[in-house]
């Protein structure tokens, strides 16, 4: 199993939003939104061990929540914040760079033997370092590479 099923679930949501607004208007409502939100919180915060089916359920719930937000057309200030908008623009480079950033940061932390000396500090530096490297490299790729291709559209 892989996260591929979550991409398929997202594709179903996109299809519903673009081509089947009748189904969206009929079935996606506030009650289903709150049920989905509760389910996401339950499975995320709970300690439940069925990784394959749980990830598909959570992805479906996220899809329902996103479709409901799109359906209502309300503007949420958090989604309009310039930082969030920019992070949305650089998501593709983040997707491409993230694994390499983890490997890069982990290599340097292990080179200094930090994982043997202090595992807590190792984990903190691994997470913080990965975020910094991922978003820095992604922003550079977006600004100096991807923007040029987007301008040609």
Image (spheres, grey):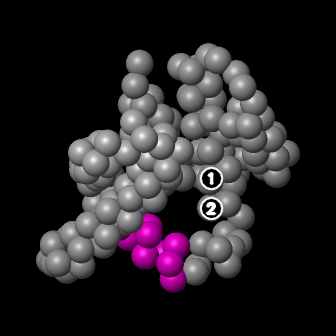
Compared across the picture, whether 136 is left or right of 146 comes to right
Badge 2 element: helix
Residue 70's label in the rendered image is 2
Compared across the picture, whether 100 is left or right of 145 comes to right
Q: Is residue 81 above or below residue 26?
A: below
Q: Residue at x 21, y 69 (%)?
A: 141
Quarter of the image with the N terminus in it: top left
Q: In this view of the protein, can residue 60 be seen by the observer?
A: yes
Name the one closer to the observer, 47 or 63: 47
Q: Is residue 17 above or below residue 77?
A: above
Residue 27's label in the rendered image is none
Quarter of the image with the C terminus in it: bottom left
Q: In this view of the protein, can residue 22 be seen by the observer?
A: no
- Using a 10 Å C-alpha cutoff, classify the residue at mark 2 as few (fewer than 14 neighbours), some (14 to 19) or many (20 or more): few
* Residue 34, percent from left and from top: 82, 46
Q: Magenta residues, as a range?
A: 82-91
Badge 1 element: helix
- Which secondary structure dominates the residues rendered in magenta? helix
Q: Residue at x 47, y 43 (%)?
A: 118
* Residue 43, percent from left and from top: 71, 32
Compared across the picture, whether 94 is left or right of 54 comes to left
Residue located farthest toward the bottom when viewing the structure as drawn? 82
* Residue 12, percent from left and from top: 49, 39
Name the one closer to the observer, 27 or 112: 112
Q: Which residue is mark 1?
A: 67
* Residue 53, percent from left and from top: 59, 20
Residue located farthest toward the front when viewing the structure as drawn? 117
Query: Does residue 85 belong to the magenta stretch?
Result: yes
Say whether marks 1 and 2 touch (CB < 8 Å): yes
Name the one closer to the observer, 7 or 68: 7
């Amino acid at each position: 199993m892989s996260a591929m099923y979550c991409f398929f679930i997202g594709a179903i949501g996109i299809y519903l939003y673009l081509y089947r607004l009748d189904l969206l208007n009929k079935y996606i409502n506030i009650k289903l939104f709150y049920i989905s939100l509760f389910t996401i919180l339950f499975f995320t915060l709970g300690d439940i061990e069925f990784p394959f089916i749980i990830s598909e359920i959570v992805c479906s719930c996220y899809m329902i929540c996103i479709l409901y937000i799109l359906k209502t057309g309300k503007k949420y200030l958090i989604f309009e914040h310039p930082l969030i908008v920019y992070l949305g623009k650089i998501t593709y480079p983040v997707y491409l760079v993230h694994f390499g950033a983890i490997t890069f940061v982990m290599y340097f932390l292990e080179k200094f033997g930090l994982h043997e000396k202090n595992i807590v500090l190792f984990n903190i530096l691994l997470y913080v370092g990965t975020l910094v490297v991922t978003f820095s490299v992604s922003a550079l790729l977006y600004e100096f590479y991807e923007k040029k291709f987007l301008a040609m559209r």
